[in-house]
Image (spheres, grey):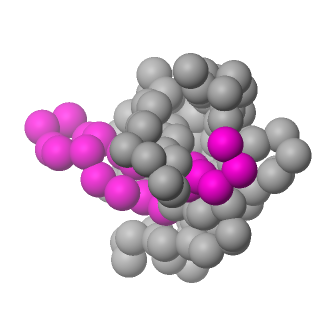
Amino acid sequence: QVQLVESGGGLVQAGGSLRLSCAASGSTVTFNTMGWYRQAPGKQRELVVIISSGGTTNYTDSVRGRFTISRDYPENTVYLQMNSLKPEDTAVYYCRYSETYSTYIVWGRGTQVTVSS
């Protein structure tokens, strides 16, 4: 079993910054992908950005250039630096862990990000 612990989030004014972190522990494997999804009220959960154990990233267009994902490999921790936040970034942000050679997926509990205008 893999456990995810998220931290960060909160309330910030438009144009501000926040940093999220997600630490994976337990039976993690070498080849995995971690990242963030978000779900706004009344909308479906969507990809924000993911990063593979090889360092390959995939950003959704709406955050590219404003958000940056980084990864601490020995600790299996990912960080999401969110700059130039917009009200439309308001959502619950979920950390996700998946394994390259299996269908195993784990979701974090989510952390609220609210951007006021």
In this view, the residue farthest toward the right is 74
Residue 58 percent coordinates (x, y): 49, 72
Residue at (69, 69) in percent of width and height: 54
Left or right: 52 as drawn, with respect to 103: right
Front in this rendered view, residue 45 or 86: 45
Residue at (39, 70) in percent of width and height: 60
Residue 89 shows in this picture: yes
**Magenta part of the chain:** 29-49
Please say if 31 is above or below 54.
above
Left or right: 52 as drawn, with respect to 48: right
Front in this rendered view, residue 95 or 42: 95
Left or right: 84 as drawn, with respect to 28: left
Residue at (82, 51) in percent of width and height: 72
Image quadrant of residue 109?
top left
Front in this rendered view, residue 44 or 105: 105
Front in this rendered view, residue 11 or 72: 72
